[in-house]
């Protein structure tokens, strides 16, 4: 009987531990658009905060970063000589929408 009870406890801890780990490893997705609403492809997106990240937008202006750490970030977007910075508090598992003035 002791062996069975121990096995149940180990399995329960493993399952709940996995749920917590998954929540901490959610990514961040986002998009960059111009003031006219058109997507901005091939934009470099830099994140400086609790951790540093980099992404490149696709043809739809979208990007994603797996396993993003929540926190306050300076987000810098750049394409060629055009650049703009934003300050955002970001949560893993969320979506970031940026509108640039170029």
Image (cartoon, rainbow, N blue to C red):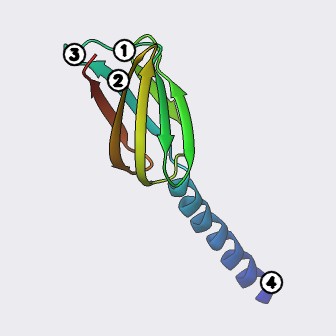
Q: Which residue is mark 3?
A: 37
Q: Nearer the viewer, mark 3 or mark 4?
A: 3
Residue 32 marker? 2
Occupied quadrant, residue 54: top right
Q: CA distance from mark 1 to mark 4?
A: 59 Å
Residue 67 in view, yes or no: no
Where is mark 4, residue-wise? Answer: 3
Q: Secondary structure at mark 1?
A: loop
Residue 14 visible in rendering: yes
Which mark is on residue 40? 1
List x then y, in percent, for residue 95: 36, 38
Residue at image location 49% in from the left, 45% down from the top: 48
> In x, y percent, where is residue 67?
57, 45
In the image, residue 46 lies at what x, y percent?
Answer: 49, 34
Of the two numbered discs 1 and 4 on the same chain, state the one appearing first in sequence: 4
Q: Is residue 97 above or below residue 89?
A: above
Measure how far apart labels 4 and 2 are at the Cα level: 56 Å
Q: Is residue 76 left or right of residue 97?
A: right
| Separation (CA) of disc 3 from disc 4 | 62 Å
The residue sitting at 42% across, 48% down in the picture is 73
46 displayed left or right of 61: right
Dot 2 and dot 1 residues touching (CB under 8 Å)? yes
Q: What secondary structure is marked by label 3?
A: loop
């Amino acid at each position: 009987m002791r062996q069975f009870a121990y096995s149940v406890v180990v399995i329960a801890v493993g399952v709940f531990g996995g749920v917590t780990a998954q929540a901490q490893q959610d990514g961040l997705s986002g998009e960059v658009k111009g003031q006219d609403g058109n997507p901005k492809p091939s934009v470099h997106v830099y994140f400086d905060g609790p951790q540093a990240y980099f992404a490149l937008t696709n043809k739809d202006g979208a990007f994603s970063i797996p396993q993003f750490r929540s926190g306050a970030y300076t987000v810098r977007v750049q394409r060629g000589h055009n650049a703009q910075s934003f300050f955002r508090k970001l949560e893993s598992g969320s979506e970031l929408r940026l509108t640039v003035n170029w």
